[in-house]
Image (spheres, grey):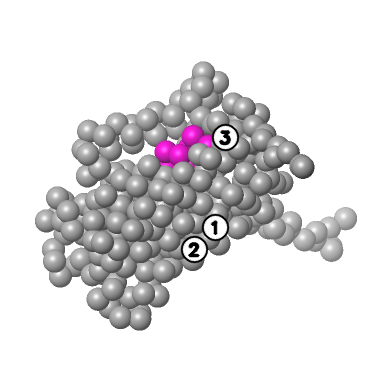
Amino acid sequence: MRKIRVTRSIIPNLFTLMNLFGGFMAITRIASGDLMAAAGFIVLAGIFDVLDGAVARLTKSTSDFGGELDSLCDAVSFGVAPAFMVYKAYFQMQGDLGAVIASLPALAGVLRLARYNVQSAGSSDKRYFRGMPIPAGALTLLSYTLFYHTGSESHLIPDEWKPLAITFVTLAVAGIMVSTVKYDAVPTPSAKVIRERPWVMSYFFLGVVVAIISKGAWLFPFMLSYIVIGLVRSSINFFRTYNDIEEDTIEEDEADPFEV
């Protein structure tokens, strides 16, 4: 009788599966109309998403299997669940077109994960993501939906603007996830990271503090700042590269054929 072999990788994989469980529970809560509880489960899924990587590194059990499993779970917790949330909050009243628009963050998130899995194997720079990471997209959608479309901050947006606003946020999140705009990865806290990237570390720490103090109400403005910083940096890099190319392609003055 063959014995079942238990390896160290089972520990981080259990954390990854708890990420998926959080996403599943979020979907059940959205279906019943309890969006706040659903947001709590998505945040819980995000915590397990962070912990599984940390545990894998701690136990030295990182593997391709774990990476693929993580992406599959992320697709549900940070792709399908937030997309279903915006559908339930508004787009279900817009018929088939509403369903199509609400599905775009989930579709874009899955595409973004697939691209990341292919590109990360040959990339040594773990400081940045190409395209906004799918957990950030999930936080943007749920923080807008809970607090600015229906919640405590909804008075800041006139009722007649809300359909346009939630549509714009949904389309923007989907588009930025599949873009090539560079976004900072959340750094692992360490003395080396604090020394080498103090501003990035301080920025993300500030985001956590802001979210806790405001009980989530200021999370959407913070996510907007994250989106804008990436767009501005990419725009600056684009124009710098464009100017460098122009300078390199300027033709040299032709020699005067009558000059000896």
Q: Looking at the image, is mark 2 or mark 3 earlier in the sequence? A: 3
Q: Residue at x 41, y 52 (%)?
A: 23
Query: Do the residues under discs 1 and 2 have CB atoms within 8 angstroms?
Result: yes
Q: CA distance from mark 2 to mark 3?
A: 30 Å
Residue 83 seen in the current view = yes
Q: Name which residue type carries label 1.
A: Arg
Q: Position of residue 151 (x, y in %)?
A: 17, 53
Q: Which residues are magenta?
A: 46-53
> Relative to the observer, which residue lies in front, 99 or 165?
99
Residue annotated with mark 1? 112
Q: Residue 85, percent across and down?
A: 32, 61
Mark 2 lies on a secondary structure that is helix
Crowd class of label 1 (few under 14; some 14 to 19; many from 20; radius 10 Å): many
Residue 103 figure quarter: bottom left
Q: Which residue is mark 2?
A: 108
Instruction: Sort mark 2 into few (<14), some (14-19) or many (20+) by Cα contacts within 10 Å.
Output: many
Residue drawn 71% across and 46% down?
122
Residue 194 versus residue 20 in the image, above or below:
above
Q: Secondary structure at mark 3?
A: helix
**In the image: residue 88, left or right of residue 260:** left
What residue is disc 3 on? 11
